[in-house]
Each structure stands twice: as structure tokens, then as C-alpha cells.
Image: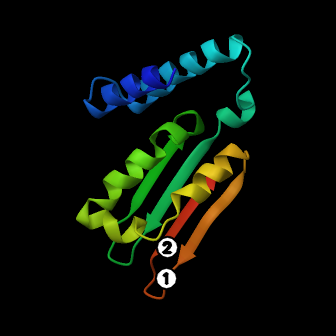
Amino acid sequence: MKTEIEKVLTMVQEGKVDATKASELIEVLNNRESVGGSSGKSTAYADKTLKIRVVSSDNDNVSVNLPIKLIKVMLKAGYNIAGNIPQSEKYVKDLDIDILIEAIENELDGPIVDIKSADGDTVSVIIE
């Protein structure tokens, strides 16, 4: 199944499908695997959203909503991409992605990261 998910992610990267469609495809792949006997996350948790909010004093604001179904698959790739974009690098350089992955694996709900800097920038990561 890992290869199939990688194909879906490649389609997203190439712009052939959007994140919503990719999420649906991955859900189908996960459902197909769970029918074979391997049980995944509870449906209620899988329907939640990871919300990332960055509010900067320079008005470089970011608001990202990602379905939990898609997160683990894309989290590291997105983090690496954001770290290579000069405008977003300073916001993600100290973010520990492993904490987010662990939170998702343990079905954490609510705030995960809440950072407020001295110059008025804030970063928050929430699962709702």
C-alpha cells in the first residue's frame, strides 16, 4: 500500500489531483487495507483536521487546514518544502515534526503547539 500512497502524493505534487481528492484516494486505500484485517484510526478521529496558524507582526500570516487522513503521509514532505522557502523557513525551523506525528498516532485532540514570540509572532497547531 505504501507504493500506492506514494503514487497519490506524486499526483498531488504534479498538480494532477488536489489535497481533497488525494485524501479520498488515501482513505479508499486505507479502507481496503483495514478490510484485510488491519484496523486503522477510529473514523471519528480520522475525520478531524490539523490546523496550523501563523500570525506575524509583519503580516506574513499563514492558515493551513489539513485532514488527519492525509497528515502522516504528507507531514514530513511539507515540512521539508516549507523549510526550503525563504519566507516560511523562519517559522518552521524550530518545529519538531516528530511531536506532531506522535500526537496523531496517539489521537491527540486540541492544541499541540502554541508559540508566542517577543516581537508578536504566534504559531499554533491544533487538531479539531
Q: Which mark is residue 122?
A: 2
Number of callouts in the render?
Answer: 2
Badge 2 or badge 1: first in the primary sequence: 1
Helix, strand or loop at mark 1: loop
Q: Position of residue 41 (x, y in %)?
A: 71, 32
Q: Nearer the viewer, residue 49 or 2?
A: 2
Helix, strand or loop at mark 2: strand
Q: Which mark is residue 117?
A: 1
Q: Amino acid at mark 1?
A: Ser
Residues under labels 2 and 1: Cα distance?
6 Å
Q: Nearer the viewer, residue 11 or 126?
A: 11
Q: Can residue 113 be seen at all in this image of the molecule?
A: yes
Quarter location, residue 31: top right
Q: Nearer the viewer, residue 59 or 69?
A: 69
Left or right of 88 on screen, residue 105: right
The residue depicted at 41 percent of the width and 32 percent of the height is 19
Left or right of 7 on screen, residue 32: right
In the rendered view, tell whether residue 61 sits above or below residue 118: above
The residue depicted at 32 percent of the width and 25 percent of the height is 11
In the rendered view, tell whether residue 50 sits above or below residue 73: below
Q: Are marks 2 and 1 in contact (CB under 8 Å)?
A: yes
Left or right of 128 on screen, residue 4: left
